[in-house]
Image: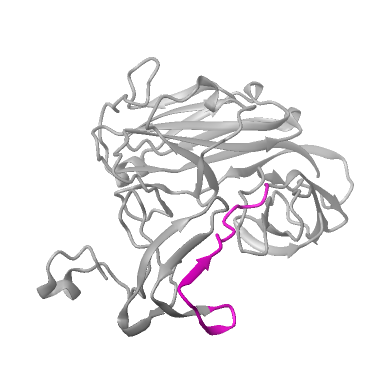
């Protein structure tokens, strides 16, 4: 099969993907792209093949016809007429909850509430890198002031859940002494963090940007996200829909609000953005409509490089934060249909802590 080729004379040069099909294959119903993860090894009598296939009520795919052999779990096996393919496990485990970090001497001690699924391994992420894994609900490692921790679950099939909201390791004074105030800057959200996103194909309920909302039917990816640009960590698949808007959500955890002196959001306006904190707008750029909808166009179409060089910077009053979970929500809008867009947001938090002189 020579994907995207339209002439047999030069199919090899035109094709974006070349695959050998052994009687059966799978293709995406919307895009028509071949799905290489389904690659059965079937052989028929004298080159004959499958007459018919169907999926039963249990999700099992059945194929019938002149099938002689197939490749099973233990090698090539005789197959008289019928072959069956059980559905693979593609459901991610539930996200762990209630992640907490405490400091004991020079050790960061993490704890969380396990997922309901058994046989799950938990990956511990510090500053966007996996630093360990465990099947338990606790983990310890060397202390690092202001470290950004996440935990996610992985099942035996390799399915990985979304990450927990970020939790920061406390900043601890080195030795007891007369405390003096010191401003400590911490990155709450950085490039490479995970976001939930949804294409603006229809109007969303107004609660999409609130703290209590559950992201049902949302996708996830790490920033920078978008399409049509360069250096994108997550390329959003639009199919043939060409939406004008995309909606993004991220939950963060903020503790010890009395110490917070500054909370700054920096987001790329490519093409236009509206930024919300806990359901309330805190800033916008290149959007004029008072209440933009999923069909609202951005005012201008800056290039990705110019938008990245001149981000929208918002200084949010700490009084707008709440103790515990907070939700950052951003809607992006294109200036014209099929306009390239990119999305990246960073959040810096300044704390006034007491350190020894």
- Judged left or right of residue 294, residue 340 is left
Against 222, is 291 above or below?
above
Q: How does the figure colour the protein chain or chains?
A: one colour
**Residue 179 placed where, x, y %?**
84, 39
**The quadrant where residue 231 appears:** bottom left
Residue 175 painted magenta: no
Residue at image point 48% right, 77% down: 80
What is the quadrant of residue 298 in the picture?
Answer: top left
**What residue is at 53 percent from the left and 59 percent from the top?**
60
Classify 168 as above or below 246: below
Judge left or right: residue 286 versus residue 207: left
Q: How many numbered circles are shown?
A: 0
Q: Which residues are magenta?
A: 72-94
In the rendered image of this protein, does residue 191 appear above or below residue 320? below
- Give the position of the C terminus as an image quadrant: top right
Residue at figure coordinates x 41%, y 25% from the top left: 284
- 81 over 60 or under it: above or below: below
Residue 316 x, y percent position in the rendering: 56, 26
In the orientation shown, which residue stands out farthest toward the left? 9
**Residue plotted at (64% across, 62% down):** 130
Q: Taken as a whole, is the magenta stretch helix, strand or loop?
A: loop
Whether 83 is among the magenta residues is yes
Along the line of sight, the residue nearer the viewer: 10 or 341: 10
Q: Say which of 148 and 263 sits in front.
A: 148
Q: Is residue 218 left or right of residue 272?
A: right
On screen, residue 266 versus residue 349, left or right, reads: left
Instruction: Specify the quadrant that holds the N terminus.
Output: bottom left
- What x and y, as percent, mark residue 198? 45, 37
Residue 133 place in picture, x, y as percent: 72, 64
């Amino acid at each position: 099969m020579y994907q995207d080729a339209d002439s047999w004379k030069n199919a090899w040069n035109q094709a974006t993907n070349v695959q050998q099909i052994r009687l059966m294959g799978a293709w995406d119903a919307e895009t028509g792209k071949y799905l290489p993860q389904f690659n059965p090894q079937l052989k028929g009598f004298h080159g004959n093949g499958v007459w018919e296939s169907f999926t039963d009520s249990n999700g099992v795919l059945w194929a019938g016809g002149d099938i002689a052999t197939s490749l099973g779990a233990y090698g090539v096996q005789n197959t008289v007429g019928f072959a069956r393919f059980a559905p693979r496990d593609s459901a991610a485990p539930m996200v762990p909850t209630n992640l907490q970090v405490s400091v004991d001497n020079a050790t960061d001690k993490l704890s969380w509430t396990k997922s309901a699924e058994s046989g799950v391994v938990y990956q511990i992420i510090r500053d966007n890198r996996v630093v360990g894994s465990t099947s338990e609900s606790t983990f310890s490692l060397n202390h690092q002031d202001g470290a950004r921790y996440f935990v996610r679950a992985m099942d035996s099939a390799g399915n990985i859940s979304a990450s927990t909201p970020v939790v920061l390791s406390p900043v601890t004074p080195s030795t007891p002494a007369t405390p003096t105030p010191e401003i400590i800057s911490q990155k709450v959200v950085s490039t490479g963090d995970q976001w939930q996103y949804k294409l603006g194909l229809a109007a969303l309920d107004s609660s999409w940007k609130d703290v209590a909302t559950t992201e049902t039917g949302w996708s996830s990816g790490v920033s920078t996200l978008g399409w049509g640009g360069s250096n994108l960590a997550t390329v959003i698949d639009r199919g043939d829909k060409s939406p004008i808007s995309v909606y993004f959500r991220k939950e963060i955890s903020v503790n010890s609000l009395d110490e917070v002196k500054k909370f700054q959001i920096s987001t790329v306006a490519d093409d236009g953005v509206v930024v919300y904190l806990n359901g309330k707008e805190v800033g916008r750029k290149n959007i004029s409509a008072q209440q933009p909808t999923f069909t609202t166009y951005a005012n201008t179409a800056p290039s990705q490089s110019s938008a990245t060089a001149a981000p929208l910077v918002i200084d949010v009053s700490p009084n707008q934060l709440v103790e515990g979970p907070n939700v950052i929500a951003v809607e992006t809008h294109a200036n014209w249909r099929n306009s390239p867009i990119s999305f990246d947001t960073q959040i810096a938090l300044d704390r006034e802590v007491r350190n020894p002189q």
